[in-house]
Amino acid sequence: MTPSPFPRFAAVDLGASSGRVMVGRVGPGSLEVEEVHRFPNTPVRTGPTLHWDILALYAGVLDGLRAAGQVASVGIDSWAVDYGLLDADGALLGNPVHYRDRRTEGIAERVWARVPAAELYGATGLQYAPFNTLYQLTAAHGTPQLAAARHALLIPDLIAYWLTGRLGTELTNASTTQLVDPRTRDWSYEVAGRLGIDLGLFPPLRRPGDPAGLLLPHVLAETGLAGDVPVTAVASHDTASAVAAVPATDGTRFAYLCTGTWSLAGLELDAPVLTEESRKANFTNELGIDGTIRYLRNIMGLWLLQECLRAWRTTDPGALLAAAAEAEPLRSVVDAGSPEFLAPGRMPERLGEACRASGQPMPASPAETVRCVLDSLALAHRRALADAQQLTGRTVDVIHLVGGGARNALLCQLTADACGLPLLAGPAEASALGNILVQARARGVLADRAEARALVARSRPPTRYEPRGGTTQWQAAEERLRIPPRSASAYAAPIR
């Protein structure tokens, strides 16, 4: 086979359960992508604190770049909110704390005493979640580690620093810290000042497509790469990269669902929605590429299923999904945004306890538990997208579901049923694709977002799911959970 003449781009895509390096070739009308290396992301608990094993992740990145071979550019995306602290010499002061750690419990009340919740939302547009960087930094206030820190780097920026020796803060990920003003696309200095947070810890902001440095000589030697290999700032929050790869036709009125460990359900807007009604509904305004706003709600996602599989000591859900498809629909559902499901451990039992507490039958088998999880996720998707339309005045004609959940046919069909809308599933590797496409745009291979999305649609046609039946039974299930319309999800701030 004749090698493709188009440039090759390496996407480092770090997820909450695993990392991978994918290589994409991009040219006019051509998009070829392959996974060259995958490695686990296993948190480590030392004493009471849950950490990311960032050095193991960095080793996996180096192994992946070695497997990738010569590339025109490297881009890095990961989950949001977490960070590493460096001292004056650029040395890491400790493994980053995991967002599922409990150190931020009770911190929100301290923050709201200085900046009331409504005022904080009006300034940053970010939904309340206990693990937002703002709350993590507040929890760390007064610790020797933070006192010794001279730089704070979000996870993709930390990896980029080790690869290039250059410091920077990519904007789409910075927008998840609850320290950025979505109107100015710059830091919210007033909020940070009132909370005693030193924004000088964060290096200058970068935009997707900006240069982030060249691979250092020792990195070249370790990976076998040669010459000047640039690192390009991509939409480094993995959801921002995933939305960039949504294969929507230009002008289509679409909603997106980025599904994986989390489900992110929302709309792509031109301006933030900072109303009090939006805050009460717990919607967030995160920044995307090309000046867009990712207006969305966080939902617990396939974490619920992943934790069940871990409890049952199985990694192959195929038989369980087949059995779940035959189980009684909507027999038992839970609020998929509830904080009681945030921590790991005993997930099947906790789901059953939540069903019992709401007066529903407890799942009697693993298949019924899986059906409970997927029905509950579809119901949460329905609520989020209905609320997003009402809060923005936008009408949605089609749902694009991307990410790992696109491989789960039952979840896709149930979501189409619950929302009463056609659903287009795929690509599953949306975060890595968005990463690659931003690199290709920075090199001039692609002109704009519309061309990039059209290329994804042609090269990876999505699977279409049509809604079956009406939505009456889904509305009844909503009422069973006693969640009022546009309720704050699990993480919503109290109404003040």
Image (cartoon, rainbow, N blue to C red):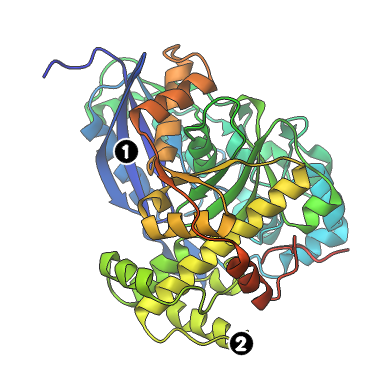
Q: Residue at 34%, 28% (x, y): give it.
A: 459
Foreground tag (1 vs 2): 2
Q: Residue at 60%, 62% (x, y): give it.
A: 471
Which quadrant would residue 346 be assigned to in this image? bottom left
Q: Is residue 374 above or below residue 21?
A: below
Q: Secondary structure at mark 1?
A: strand
Farthest left residue in view: 1
Q: Position of residue 221 (x, y in %)?
A: 24, 27
Q: Secondary structure at mark 2?
A: helix
Q: Position of residue 207 (x, y in %)?
A: 59, 26
Q: Position of residue 390 (x, y in %)?
A: 75, 49
Residue at the disc numbered 1: 21
State the quadrant of the C terminus. bottom right
Q: Position of residue 300 (x, y in %)?
A: 54, 62
Amino acid type of the residue tagged 1 in the rendering = Val
Mark positioned earlier in the residue sequence (1 or 2): 1
Q: Nearer the viewer, residue 230 or 437?
A: 437
Q: Residue at 23%, 33% (x, y): give it.
A: 66
How far apart are the alpha carbons under marks 1 and 2? Answer: 43 Å
Q: Is residue 285 above or below residue 261?
A: above
